[in-house]
Image (cartoon, helix red, strand yellow):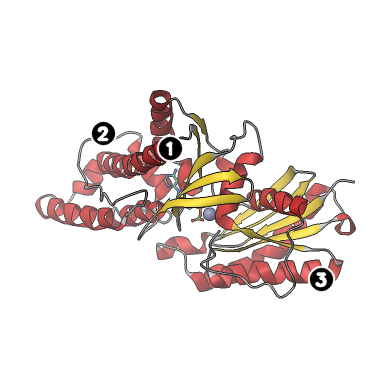
Amino acid sequence: MKVNILAIESSCDETSAAVISDGKILNNIIATQSVHEKYGGVVPELASRAHQQHLIPVVAEAMNDSGILKKDLHAVAFTKGPGLMGSLMVGVSFAKSFAYALGIPLIEVNHMQAHILAHFIDSPQPKFPFVCLTVSGGHTQLVLVKDYLDMEIIGETTDDAVGEAFDKTAKLLGLPYPGGPLIDKYAKEGNPNAYEFPISDIPGLNFSFSGIKTAVLYFLRDQIKDNPGFITENLADICASIQHTLVKTLLQKLKKAAQMHNVKEIAIAGGVSANSGLREALKMMADKQGWKIYIPKFEYCTDNAAMIAMAAHFKYQKGEFSGLDVVPEARMKF
Ligand code: KG4
Ligand code: ZN
């Protein structure tokens, strides 16, 4: 008998549904919310409303496309957290009602664990133990992954996430939200050593990214005073320099983590792992350090339900189900 699971992701601003059958992802339907662009960031209230509008059509599309009938589903999985409370609530309520109506179990999934488990959707797959650098708009974590569901956070940001640093500095440059991919795009044409921004070095494996935003703000203010056209004239160099600083910070700590835990299997996950500067620098470091590196397909880097489905597959095998009294957790830990 094939185990079929429907998975739902609604932690931030993507509404997504996916169906997995016997560990194989059949589809990954994603509705992106464009409503936030003009506000320069995700507006939580608008995000939950958009999830309410998108969720049923997205689930219907995933189910129809899979060719699996509702009566042949074995479980419904959902993101329990971390994320925006109102957004999580929409997914959790839907999953509960759906599971209750069909009389099948519910599987709760930790969004950050799921980003890492996206590595098991396709091949090649990392071998345990591996270190994963999970970098998104809400999180920056170094995780020691001992098994599918046995993970330990060995380092994390003490303030902003690296995705936030990309998005906030992009906003200072007048770029629309989310600015991360645009910094990546302009950086390709620029000189990464044109300007120097400070890297806040904090002890151990933790990160701090709030300083760069202020550094860029003061730098731009000083430059614009002398030349009002500074940003437009030097956009590529500014983007390349910001990206270079952020990537260097990430890789310094990743190298330290790999050495401390004597691990040579290295993975990256989360939205920022789509960054081409990070991917290139990681490949160079891997050559020097003798690492084997794993970078997910672009589709599985940013928020998606396929990764939730993959995590649910492992939880189903272990019989880890939730009751109908389960509630979302905005600050969920592992
Ligand atoms: O994982 P994700 O889709 O959502 C969260 O869980 O936060 O990550 C979104 C973040 C945003 O900050 C976005 O700017 C960043 O990932 N991002 C990038 C790139 N693509 C997405 N940052 C830098 N370069 C990119 N190519
Ligand atoms: Zn995410």
Give whichever of discs 3 and 1 has the lower sequence position: 3
Please tell me which of labels 2 and 1 falls first in the chain: 2
Q: Quadrant of the C terminus?
A: bottom right
Q: Which residue is drawn at 38% across and 51% down?
A: 162
| 290 lies left or right of 87 | left
Q: Distance between the residues labelled 2 and 3?
A: 56 Å
Secondary structure under tag 3 reads helix
Q: Which residue is drawn at 40% across and 36% down?
A: 259
Q: For disc 1, does the CB lie below 8 Å from ligand 1?
A: no
Report if residue 303 is visible in the image: no
Residue 148 in view: yes
Q: Is mark 2 on a helix, strand or loop?
A: loop
Out of 291 and 213, give the one closest to the viewer.
291
Q: Which amino acid does label 2 sit on?
A: Asn
* Crowdedness near tag 2: few (<14), some (14–19) or many (≥20) residues, C-alpha within 10 Å: some
| Mark 3 residue type | Tyr
The numbered mark, 2 or 3, whose residue comes first in the sequence reads 3
Q: In this view, does 86 lie above or below 160?
A: below
The residue that label 3 is drawn on is: 100
- Label 2 or label 1, whichever lies nearer to me, is 1
x then y, percent, for residue 87? 58, 68
Please name the residue that numbered disc 1 is placed on. 258
Q: Residue at x 86, y 46 (%)?
A: 2
Spatial distance from mark 2 to mark 1, Cα to Cα? 29 Å
Q: What residue type is labelled 1?
A: Ala
Report the mark closest to the observer, 3 or 1. 1
Left/right of residue 333 with respect to residue 148 in the rendered view:
left
**In the rendered structure, are the residues bearing label 3 and label 1 in contact, judged by CB atoms less than 8 Å apart?**
no
| Nearer to me, 296 or 208 | 208
Residue at numbered disc 2: 191
Q: At which x and y percent is residue 221?
A: 16, 56
